[in-house]
Image (cartoon, rainbow, N blue to C red):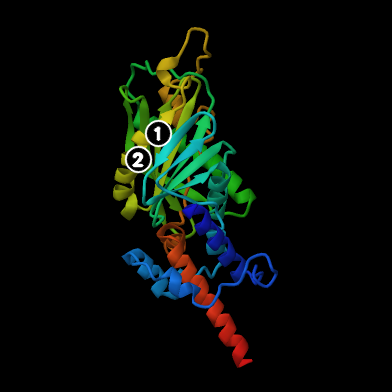
Amino acid sequence: MKERSILVAVVLLCALLHGRAAVAQGRVPAPKPGASAAASAAPASSAQAEAEAGDEVVPTSPRERALMALPWQNGPTTGALGTIAEIKVPEGQMYLDGDGARRLLEIDQNPTSGRELGLVAAADMSWVMTFEFSEVAHVEDDETAPLDADKLLASLREGNATGNEARRSRGWETVSLVGWAMPPTYDAQSKNLEWATHVRNDTTMGVTVNHNIRLLGRSGVMEAGLLASPEDYGAGLAASKAMLPGFSFKVGQRYDEFREGDRIAEYGLTGLITGGALAVAAKSGFLAKAGKGIVKLVVVGGAAVAGLLSRLFGRKRASSDRE
């Protein structure tokens, strides 16, 4: 119920900022005098006080309003990743379903695959981790040759060139794959393959780290992708790694539940890195600090949202009185 009330307040705020105040149209009752005082009567956390104290949290750009309108779910919660898996989202992090994840990526000019099942973000948007499922069949992890980092990087750059063609067709900025932030490694015990690259926006020259983790399942691979700025990468990687033990395939979908007769993938670990068809597009332009103040409204709770709404309504009334 608490999350529902927060989201209702967020929707009301977005409507007000767009000049479509729900109050004026009779859809939502106007706040009663003294409501803001009641909302703030309980002791507020420092985060709540910070959100209530300054106007910097008010979304002013289309980008911020679009971010505000996403269907965020606050942790602790469990996010369903389709019918394949689920992720436990701890307190201080947020979850978006597949549709919300695609909308967030589109906001920052990142191509989507249509296979996005969900997304987890830090409360301050310093990092996000997307989840996509690739039903490529059962990937055997019995490659004996070591992974060739140089050849793999060349293949990734080829895939990124394909991704840039899609960006240009939409009038988006292109990106360059600079090099490894972490060469590919495979953990045979956890069945996790991971690597990371530095990606540079060709227009702004801003750099994003793309950290990829492939979680092997019975019938395919869950593709977890961490996006963060270089300065937030270390903390983001630590936080996302602490979250990942809460990831689990549903019963019947785990790697060790493979049965004779299940379909076998045509490629192994190397193919997972290059994307099989060399169609791996790097992501950049991460929202990061541009969205921190806005998302804080969702995270810190109803008191902060109620306080902000009260100030906005108060300003509107004062303006009307002057006229």
Q: Which residue is mark 2?
A: 243
Q: CA distance from mark 1 to mark 2?
A: 8 Å
Image quadrant holding the C terminus, namely bottom right
Q: Disc 1 marks which amino acid? A: Phe
How many numbered dots are placed on residues in this image? 2
Residue at disc 1, secondary structure: strand
Q: Nearer the viewer, residue 56 or 151?
A: 56
Q: Which residue is mark 1?
A: 247
The answer to whether residue 230 is left or right of residue 294 is: left
Q: Residues within 10 Å of mark 2 (few under 14, many from 20)?
A: some
Rendered position, 189 above or below 279: above
Q: Identify the residue at image location x=65%, y=72%.
A: 19
Q: Position of residue 88 (x, y in %)?
A: 40, 39
Q: Is the C-beta separation of discs 1 and 2 under 8 Å?
A: yes
Q: Residues within 10 Å of mark 1 (few under 14, many from 20)?
A: some
Rendered position, 25 above or below 144: below
Q: Disc 2 marks which amino acid? A: Met
Q: Position of residue 293 (x, y in %)?
A: 43, 65
Q: Nearer the viewer, residue 134 or 85?
A: 85
Residue at disc 2, secondary structure: helix
Q: Identify the residue at image location x=46%, y=59%.
A: 298
Rendered position, 82 above or below 141: below
Rendered position, 217 above or below 180: above
- Residue 174 can be seen, yes or no: yes
